[in-house]
Image (tube, rainbow, N blue to C red):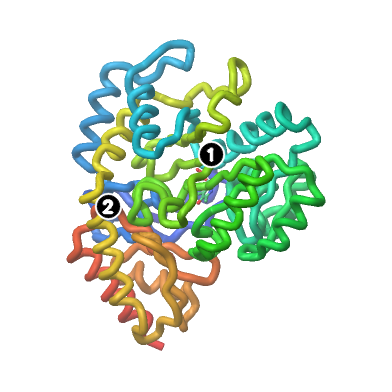
Amino acid sequence: MNERLRALDQTYIAHTYARFPVDLVRGEGSLAYDGAGKAYIDMGSGIGVTAFGFADPVWCGAVTEQLTKLQHTSNLYYTEPCAKLAELLCRRTGMQRVFFCNSGAEANECTVKVARKYASERKGPQYSAILTLENSFHGRTLTTLAATGQEHYHELFQPLTPGFCHAPAGDLAAVERLLREHPTAGILIECIQGEGGVVPLDPAFVQGLAKLCAEQDVLLMVDEVQTGNGRTGTLYAYEQFGICPDVVSTAKGLGGGLPLGATLIGEKAKDVLSFGDHGSTFGGNPVCCAGAYSILERLDEPFLASVREKSRLAFSMLQGAKGVRSVTGLGLMIGVETVRPAKEIVSACLEKGVLCLTAKEKVRFLPALNIPTELLQTALERFLSVCADC
Ligand SMILES: *Cc1c(COP(=O)(O)O)cnc(C)c1O
């Protein structure tokens, strides 16, 4: 580790992150290199962001071509990359309108605005509650923290945006009770709770929510910030839960490494946002959108089948292995409960040249979707040798 860099960072960067003692200087596909030239197999893709790995030539080509033409215009003018990306997103999902922003939290902020305006116009402004689930994660702004159903994120930052309530995941009766008690605009869920420990929801519960939402004209909104853009082996995870949401938020992998968030709005609420209701200076930036288009275009059925194939390989290697208690997730979003503490495992993996993530008490893998099978296998072998060492 470069000590000068560590000291600089410690002195001048706010201490909100516990960084690993590694300085990454470059990458290629699923390999990253530190300042001393040591190679790491990347099993985290910058928390599910670099969907096609580091310095992916197709993405780099799309980005640099746009970069040298026009890097920013503001939303006062039309640009092709943003319109084309919106069209592709709608064509691939059946959604009707897209609002572009710069992050997952902002994409979720937009879902709240859409739900509140939709409900206010139809039923009255008192229908403002947003129901989310316990153990969820929706972002770090004061509104998305309020949406996040984990108390420890809330401490010290009160008061948060009012009007949020949380139900235990899987408990439809509790959801029905909350809907009776609080005039509700929307329900926001993650199909797989990522930061909550890679915990998939029960599809029957998700379908039950969809039914309640349809009956009560409450918007069903799915946070696909982490699960979206091919991560779970389908373009969006909700496809595997047998529902068609009214609103979808996404970010992370969509931009492939540049900041881009999107809120996709379906038929019911497509005309809710009108002139002046929302905006973003950077949202829909042409460079980010050109890169995103090059990613979304490649997430076709054969590619998604390859993600599912790699997922099967990973699950078969992990399940029942020594030192592994359980494996959860879908596609290439994988949570592993280990006998040894997750933090210890991740540090040991770092030593062995593998970058992993944690989620709560689990080790979490979010490799690039195009990680070569041999690298995936090698990374998991190294991880399992650390797990077995207990
Ligand atoms: C990461 C994440 C967010 C927040 O995204 P940012 O880009 O950090 O604002 C929101 N929801 C989910 C499910 C996430 O995984």
x, y percentage for residue 306?
23, 57
Check disc 1 and report its element: helix, strand or loop: strand
Mark 2 vs mark 1, CA separation in Å:
23 Å
The kind of residue tagged 2 is Leu
Mark 1 sits on what residue? 247
The C terminus lies in which quarter of the figure? bottom left
Residue pictured at 21% horizontal, 50% vertical: 302
Residue pictured at 58% horizontal, 61% vertical: 205
x, y percentage for residue 148?
64, 52
The mark nearer the N terminus, 2 or 1, is: 1
Residue pictured at 35% horizontal, 67% vertical: 350
Q: Nearer the viewer, residue 268 or 255?
A: 268
Mark 2 sits on what residue? 304
Residue pictured at 78% horizontal, 47% vertical: 158
Q: Nearer the viewer, residue 99 or 385?
A: 99
Check disc 2 and report its element: helix, strand or loop: helix
The N terminus lies in which quarter of the figure? bottom left
x, y percentage for residue 69?
27, 17
